[in-house]
Image (spheres, rainbow, N blue to C red):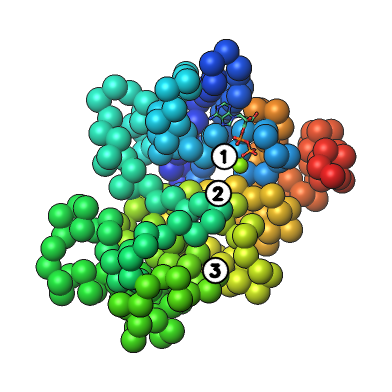
Amino acid sequence: MDEKKIKIKNLNLFFGNTKVLKNINIDIFSNNITTFIGPSGCGKTTCLRCLNRMMDMNKNCRVTGEILIDGINIYSPDINVTMLRQNIGMVFQKPNLFPKNIYDNIVYGPRVRGIRKRQLLDKIVKKTLESVGLWEALCERLSDRIDKLSGGQQQRLCIARAIATSPEIILMDEPTSALDPISKLKIEDLIDTLREKYTIIVVTHDMQQATRISDRTAFFLDGEIIEYDYTCELFNNPKEKKTNDYLTGRYDP
Ligand SMILES: Nc1ncnc2c1ncn2[C@@H]1O[C@H](COP(=O)(O)OP(=O)(O)O)[C@@H](O)[C@H]1O
Ligand SMILES: [Mg+2]
């Protein structure tokens, strides 16, 4: 059964007087991989960042509407933003690990949450590295600094760090766009395996990637969601002319 994990209702976002997100309405399903596609500057990143209230950090930015996660409006005044963010892992375009060793990167979040026992931290490191397919390669090297890892391994480690605090939702903003093709496919395989435990939203520029990894796709254009559907439906049988125009290469060079 498809269960709705996130409901975005009448979401508008302004930078100063400029409206960047225009009446976004979308339901994101549990244990789905949902991709946001659309040309550069259409609001994908901004919409993604509304989900963990990262846009709040920008003083010039104003949000109206609601985002419900498990039925709770995360924009209501009594929401604890720190707790909210612990439930939502985030992975960025470029690996953004801390200049520390592999172990300390993974346990950063759990330590912030007050976990101090070495045994428990060790367990978290093993479990998360296993989930991202890096345990065998790295178990003997946990005290190595992260600059010894390849870009693909660093990005997988970012995913490990994101899941180390046991979030329910993972947001990824173009997670493979800085990687070589082989590392990219490895990350795609990894994302596929994470579906079982997490609700995942991936912003991607890469339409083939969207078709490979996602259950559902939302097409953004100029701050609006033009169409949202099962990925195979949206790509094979788009209902909107604008979607079809985009898919056939009319907006992006
Ligand atoms: N901090 C900001 N201040 C002002 N405008 C911004 C800011 N961040 C993004 N924008 C504008 O919001 C729009 C959407 O940007 P973005 O969400 O990054 O698009 P995408 O991820 O689809 O490429 C763009 O027009 C961009 O210029
Ligand atoms: Mg973006």
Q: Is residue 144 left or right of residue 221?
A: left
Q: Is residue 24 left or right of residue 60?
A: right
**Which residue is at 37% across, 26% downward?**
75
The residue wearing badge 2 is: 173
Asked if the residue at label 2 sits under 8 Å from ligand 2, the reply is yes
- Label 2: how many Cα within 10 Å (few below 14, some 14–19, many 20+): many
Q: Are marks 3 and 2 in contact (CB under 8 Å)?
A: no
Is residue 202 among what the camera can see?
Answer: no
Ranked by sequence position, the earlier of labels 2 and 1 is 1
Label 2's element?
A: strand
Query: Nearer the viewer's eye, disc 3 or disc 2?
Result: 3
**Which residue is at 41% across, 85% downward?**
136
Quadrant in the picture for the C terminus: top right
| Image-quarter location of ligand 1 | top right
Residue type indicated by callout 1: Thr
Asked if the residue at label 1 sits under 8 Å from ligand 1, the reply is yes
Report which quarter residue 68 is drawn in. Answer: top left
**Which residue is at 33% across, 23% downward?**
76
- Label 3 – label 1 distance at C-alpha: 22 Å
The residue wearing badge 1 is: 45
- Label 3 – label 2 distance at C-alpha: 16 Å
- Label 3: how many Cα within 10 Å (few below 14, some 14–19, many 20+): some
Q: Nearer the viewer, residue 80 or 253?
A: 253
Asked if the residue at label 3 sits under 8 Å from ligand 2, the reply is no
The residue wearing badge 3 is: 151
